[in-house]
Image: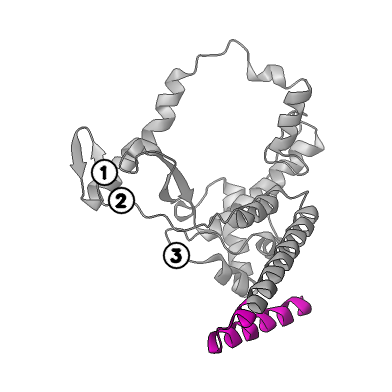
Amino acid sequence: MLSLLKSIKRKNTLYKRFLNNPSPRNEHQYKCFKNKLNHSLRIAKRLYYEKKIEEAKSNVKITWKLLNEVLNKSHFKQKLPHTFHFKNQTLDDPKLIAERFCDYFTSIGPNLAKKILPSSKSYRSFLSGNYLHPFILKEATEQEIIHVCSTLKPGAALGFDSIPFTLIKETINLISNHITHIFNLSLTSGIVPLELKIARVVPLFKADDKSSFSNYRPISVLPSFSKILEKLVYNRLIDYLNMYKILSDNQFGYRKQHSTEYALTLLYDK
């Protein structure tokens, strides 16, 4: 790294010399050194990404992030067009556009459900054991709340309340007792506070015409506090499912040490 920095400074010195005295000799020296430096930089870049990809070979998310860096695929905040087409009309009123998005997104589920034929096989046929053990949502402790907070990623998108998760992480030691009390009331009563269920729905563009509502898919962004409660319930549910071996061996999604890659491998092998 240090040698490359010195070489870059050397190239800049030769370039300044060439600009001050554009003789054939100075031009030749500058271009030859620049070509050698570019070759060294390409090798260094290749070795850098080879090392990074090797280190992240067990993490698909980081691997794709590195590949996108190599391919110069930048992530930018999408901008919705000012006008949309709906039933031979052009909509430019933001309120009407939001309402049409709401109508479209809420109709996707029921429309897909109508196309699914009823199955003659009961879901119970996939559960061969006798699962008589009760599932109990035990209360959380302040230490568990603090631990869950530390494991969640701080860079999540803001919910409708605009409270960033970084703020919660920085103040969790001061508010953990209050959060624990509220969440334990939810776990014991089975009622989720309404404010934790309000989602900020963001339309994400897929492909083709940007002015068509059908070319977007919804992403629901929940408040930051709801993510903590979700994690508490998830931990209890996944412990119960693993303890009594209820999940099928072919359940690959949303499980530790499992991924869709294993599903593809199984499909290919069988």
**CB under 8 Å between discs 3 and 2:** no
Looking at the image, is 110 positioned above or below residue 254? above
In this orientation, does residue 65 appear? yes
* Closer to the camera in the image, 23 or 149: 23
Mark 3 residue crowding within 10 angstroms, few (<14) / some (14–19) / many (20+): few
**Which residue type does callout 1 highlight?**
Phe
Q: Residue placed at 57% from the left, 13% from the top?
A: 119
Q: Which circle's residue, 1 or 3, is located before the other in the chain?
A: 1
- SS class of the residue under badge 1? strand
Quadrant assignment for the N terminus: bottom right
Quadrant assignment for the C terminus: top right
Q: Residue placed at 75% from the left, 65% from the top?
A: 44
Q: Residue furthest front?
A: 24
Cα–Cα span, label 1 and label 2: 7 Å
Q: Which residue is mark 2?
A: 81
User: Mark 1 or 3, which is nearer the eye?
Assistant: 1
Question: 49 left or right of 31?
Answer: right
Mark 2 residue crowding within 10 angstroms, few (<14) / some (14–19) / many (20+): few
The x, y position of residue 168, in whole percent, is 57, 69
User: Mark 3 or 2, which is nearer the eye?
Assistant: 2
The x, y position of residue 245, in whole percent, is 80, 32
Q: Which residues make up the magenta segment?
A: 1-27
Q: Which mark is residue 84?
A: 1
Q: Which residue is mark 3?
A: 162
Mark 1 residue crowding within 10 angstroms, few (<14) / some (14–19) / many (20+): many
**Which residue type does callout 3 highlight?**
Ser
Looking at the image, is 78 positioned above or below residue 88? below
* Closer to the camera in the image, 264 or 26: 26
**CB under 8 Å between discs 1 and 2:** yes
**CB under 8 Å between discs 1 and 3:** no
